[in-house]
């Protein structure tokens, strides 16, 4: 069975498809947030060293992973747009940037609130924290650069280059705790497994999936507006029922 | 476990609830902004059509 993938990369097809998918992603995200936080707060035991403060992990780690993952997906879409000149990929890249930036912000904020009681400082210029801050600045730089160029196709190309070069930072964040002697603790989830209590793992993983579903839902909702803005002069947009009211 | 004890988080209430509260607030603001953008985009489409330069 041959699937014509290019059909789905047409903004007109994708617009409708995304509209149908958003409620499913939103509902499953809400359910998984509820389940994950229930396990995190009521099933997972108190930590022997960090007492209840460790429970910040259930939002801190998922937000941090998502901030890095979304960046790579964004850079991937931007690269596709640059190479194949596909409009939708570039629109997806710009739709992902604000969500990624907000996850980076949540990661830094929850990290500060965790650092204060555990290390005695809201912030230290540690390799892990600094590289995550640079990630936030890369997102903001991408958004600002895209917004500063009037011609959207030129804006796509210029910001794609920034996104691709910036993706070097993601492995730096991930390996920073290994490469440098940092105050930040080592990786919680390694490729080789984890030493965490099973309920803690379940809570963290469930919230991670919930955050991912949330990111998909909100980015799809955002890309629908971007599609309408950039395709506003086309026949299919003028024939949409929501534009006809 | 009673609720007062639960919210007290053994003295870490500010840090734990400050984390989850901020995350929730950020999610809510983002959803609001995305919805607002859709409203504005659709309004602009209709204005453009009414102004007659829709094609």
Image (cartoon, coloured by chain):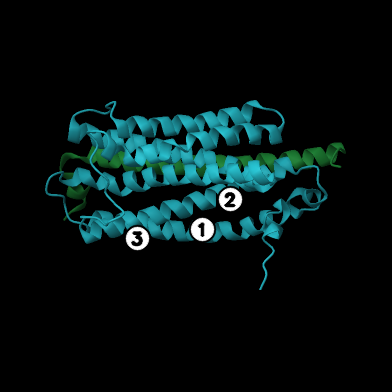
Chain colours: A cyan, B green
* Quadrant in the rendering for residue A108: top left
SS label for mark 1: helix
Q: Can you see residue B8?
A: no
- Residue B15 to residue A19: above or below: above
Position above or below: A208 against A99: below
Circle 2 residues within 10 Å: few <14, some 14–19, many ≥20: many
Dot 3 falls on a residue whose secondary structure is helix
Task: Indicate left or right for A243 with A194 as reference.
Answer: right
Query: What is the spatial separation of the Cα atoms under label 3 and label 2, in whole angstroms?
Result: 24 Å
| Front-lying residue, B31 or A188 | A188
Looking at marks 3 and 2 on the same chain, the residue that comes earlier in the sequence is marked by 3
Q: Chain of mark 3?
A: A
Give the chain of mark 2. A
Looking at this view, is A192 or A233 the one in front?
A192
Q: Which mark is residue A35?
A: 3
Residue A79 visible from this viewpoint: yes
Residue position marked by numbered label 2 in the rendering: A220
- What is the CA distance from the residue labelled 1 to the residue labelled 3? 15 Å
Measuring from the top left, give residue A145's x and y in whole percent: 59, 28
Label 2 and label 1: CA atoms lie apart by: 10 Å
Whether pointer 2 and pointer 1 mark residues with C-beta atoms closer than 8 Å, the reply is yes
Labels 2 and 1: the sequence-earlier one? 1
Q: Nearer the viewer, residue A231 or A34?
A: A231
Mark drawn on residue A122: none
Q: What is the quadrant of residue A162 in the picture?
A: top right
Quadrant containing the N terminus of chain B in the rendered view: bottom left
Residue A18 appears left or right of A26: right
- Which chain contains the residue that carries disc 1? A
Residue A232 locus on image (x, y percent): 77, 42
Crowd class of label 1 (few under 14; some 14 to 19; many from 20; radius 10 Å): some
Task: Determine which of the numbered discs, if any, sits on residue A25 in the image.
Answer: 1
């Amino acid at each position: 069975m041959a699937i014509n993938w290019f059909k789905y990369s047409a903004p007109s097809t994708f617009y409708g498809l995304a509209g149908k998918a958003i409620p499913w992603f939103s509902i499953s995200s809400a359910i998984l947030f509820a389940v994950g936080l229930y396990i995190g707060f009521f099933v997972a035991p108190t930590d022997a060293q960090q007492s209840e403060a460790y429970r910040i992990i259930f939002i801190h780690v998922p937000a941090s992973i998502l901030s890095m993952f979304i960046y790579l997906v964004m850079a991937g879409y931007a690269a596709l747009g640059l190479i194949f000149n596909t409009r939708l990929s570039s629109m997806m890249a710009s739709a992902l940037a604000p969500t990624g930036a907000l996850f980076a912000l949540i990661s830094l904020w929850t990290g500060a609130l965790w650092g204060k009681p555990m290390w005695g400082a809201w912030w230290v210029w540690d390799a892990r924290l600094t590289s995550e801050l640079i990630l936030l600045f890369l997102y903001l730089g991408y958004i600002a650069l895209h917004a500063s160029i009037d011609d959207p196709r030129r804006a796509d190309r210029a910001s794609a280059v920034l996104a691709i070069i910036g993706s070097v930072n993601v492995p730096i964040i991930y390996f920073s705790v290994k490469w440098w002697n940092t105050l930040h603790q080592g990786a919680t989830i390694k490729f080789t497994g984890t030493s965490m209590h099973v309920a803690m793992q379940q809570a963290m993983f469930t919230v991670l999936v919930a955050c991912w579903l949330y990111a998909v839902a909100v980015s799809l909702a955002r890309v629908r507006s971007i599609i309408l803005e950039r395709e506003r002069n086309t026949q299919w947009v003028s024939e949409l029922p929501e534009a006809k009211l | 476990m009673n609720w007062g004890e639960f919210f007290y988080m053994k003295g870490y209430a500010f840090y734990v609830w400050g984390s989850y509260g901020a995350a929730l607030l950020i999610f809510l603001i983002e959803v609001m902004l995305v919805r607002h953008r859709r409203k504005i985009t659709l309004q602009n489409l209709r204005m453009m059509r009414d102004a007659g330069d829709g094609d």
